[in-house]
Amino acid sequence: MLEALTLREGYFGDPAAFQALADLLQDIFGIDISHQMKLGGPDPTSMPFGYFDPSGRCVANFSAFSMPLVVNGRVVRAAGYQSGAVRPDYRGQGLYRTLMKRAFDWAERGGFEAGILLTDKPGLYEPYGFRTIPQFKFYGAVPQADLPVPRARDLDLKQTADLHMVQMALDTRQPVSETFSVVRQKEMFLLNAHFDPDIRLSLLAEDDAVIAWKPQGQTSLQILDVAARNVPPLGHIVASLGPNFQNAEVFFPPDRLDWKGAARPHQGDCVLMVRGLEPASLTQPFMLSPLADF
Ligand SMILES: CC(C)(COP(=O)(O)OP(=O)(O)OC[C@H]1O[C@@H](n2cnc3c(N)ncnc32)[C@H](O)[C@@H]1OP(=O)(O)O)[C@@H](O)C(=O)NCCC(=O)NCCS
């Protein structure tokens, strides 16, 4: 059965092959990445490695892409890994091992100094030097704004003008944290906002800032990400989202927010794994914004 398979890499230029990957991920994870085509397309740095059967069906895949990070104020050239799946009738025969090796070799040849991925099966990646890093979110009272703040406007990614606004904010953004954050990650931000209908995107027009957030009852809110040239202080952001919010939970290190919250462990469905990052550079509590999930 395996002899009939073709190994393809970097195949996103072929729309049928991209759709075959979307079908694989739909069948295995129940997510539809073909929506990316309406949101500006996949990350141009993506390097997918996949096995295809003679009918063009994608039976296994593992993708690498360029995911520059800011870690303790330094830009780190990291490779992200995502879209790992093998169809059930092809498992246990080493397909994934081959795809992982191809992707890791590609990253090594490309000079990436670090690797990062999210998984619910850390044991798969430990043999390749990845280790699990705990993540923390930040909780506390919201400082009150000194002056009245204009109300933010809700954005809708289905409206072309709003989509362009968000794309522009993501293209020109300042990394949301100096402690740990992505440098850009535009495509995943858009897809993650699309996947979770509870995420609100709001524009603070005077700051050119797009806030990804969720209200939690009447008086609390979650701040998930901020795409802005200059990240505004938390008090300013929250006042623009509504007058009654007293407590915030921030899903990224708040070093640019002019605010300190208490770090609390974050339990997600997946753990964050890295390799190639000095343990000494990861001493501050942090989490990767959910809008950067990949
Ligand atoms: C996990 C998955 C990709 C493995 O695919 P596969 O083709 O059966 O894997 P392989 O046969 O190539 O095995 C590769 C290695 O992973 C190990 N492995 C397989 N499944 C594993 C699991 N669930 N946990 C830990 N290790 C696992 C194998 O023992 C093998 O180790 P070895 O190289 O030391 O012999 C496949 O089961 C799958 O698609 N699962 C559902 C989706 C998923 O979990 N994707 C990964 C999310 S990050």
Image (cartoon, grey):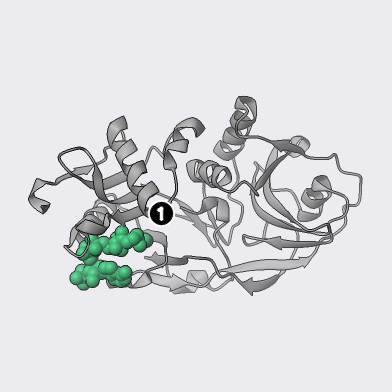
Choose between 73 and 273: the one closer to the eye.
273
- In the image as oriented, which residue stretches furthest toward the right? 147
Give the residue drawn at x 20%, y 42%: 8
Left or right: residue 212 compared with residue 191: right
Residues packed near mark 1 inside 10 Å, few (<14), some (14 to 19) or many (20 plus): few
Choose between 75 and 38: the one closer to the eye.
38
Callout 1: helix, strand or loop?
helix
Image vertical order of residue 228 relative to residue 77, above or below: above
Q: How many marks?
A: 1
Quarter for ligand 1? bottom left
Choose between 170 and 52: the one closer to the eye.
52
Choose between 88 and 244: the one closer to the eye.
88
Left or right: residue 12 compared with residue 294: left
Residue 287 coordinates in the image, percent (x, y): 56, 64
Residue 46 coordinates in the image, percent (x, y): 35, 43
Give the residue drawn at x 62%, y 46%: 197
Give the residue drawn at x 56%, y 70%: 267
| Residue position for label 1 | 29
Image vertical order of residue 237 relative to residue 216, above or below: above
Residue 222 coordinates in the image, percent (x, y): 70, 57
Give the residue drawn at x 61%, y 36%: 166
**Amino acid type indicated by mark 1:** Phe
Image vertical order of residue 155 relative to residue 90, above or below: above
Image vertical order of residue 271 relative to residue 99, above or below: below
Residue 12 coordinates in the image, percent (x, y): 31, 36
Q: Is mark 1 within 8 Å of ligand 1?
A: yes
